[in-house]
Amino acid sequence: MKIMDFLRKEFIKVNLETRSKEEVIEELVEPLVKAGAVNDKKAAIKVLLEREELGSTGIGQGVAMPHAKTGAVRNLVAAFGLSKSGVDFDALDGEPVNIFFLLLAPEEAAGDHLKALAGISSLLKDKHFRRALLNAKDADAVEKIIQEEERLGQ
């Protein structure tokens, strides 16, 4: 499963404008709603915030992967966000988060949800990959970085 199969270029934001966990989630869900990939914005945000209450998806090293299963989507879908200044996301290491992969899956797609999380996590373990993402100037650059990393990883 390739990340760009469920992360479209128009779902990539390299200059997040928000400064809080809730605002970041709303900002990343917005393009998914506009494109029709999410059919209920409030439900999607609610389930993502409920998941955050169970434990932060800020996994450390400047990375967060907010994710949830919801009836608000028909297919696995992701958004990517980059905050140059960092956001307090209650990350496990206490550090600000710069790189966000938001993932939503249909409730019945637990297997795909877990495969997608595992694939994204695997790529994000590489500090060079994280650094390349941090330096990306636009959505095209992010897309190219992800595609190249996945190609090398095969």
Image (cartoon, rainbow, N blue to C red):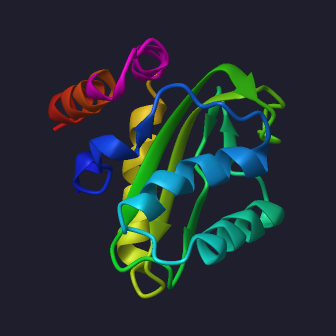
As displayed, is residue 122 above or below residue 103? above
Residue extent of the magenta highlight:
127-140
Q: Main secondary structure of the magenta part?
A: helix
Q: Residue at x 22, y 54 (%)?
A: 5
Q: Nearer the viewer, residue 40 or 88?
A: 40
Q: Nearer the viewer, residue 75 or 132?
A: 75
Membership of 8 in magenta stretch: no
Quadrant of the image containing the N terminus: bottom left
**Where is residue 65 drawn, in percent x and y?**
58, 48
**Quadrant in which residue 111 is drawn:** bottom left
- Is 10 displayed left or right of 70 in the figure? left
Q: Nearer the viewer, residue 32 or 122?
A: 32
Q: Residue at x 43, y 76 (%)?
A: 73
Membership of 132 in magenta stretch: yes
Quadrant of the image containing the C terminus: top left
**Quadrant in which residue 62 is drawn:** top right
- Is 148 displayed left or right of 138 in the figure? left
Q: Residue at x 15, y 33 (%)?
A: 151
As displayed, is residue 98 above or below residue 32? above
**Where is residue 77 drawn, in percent x and y?**
38, 62
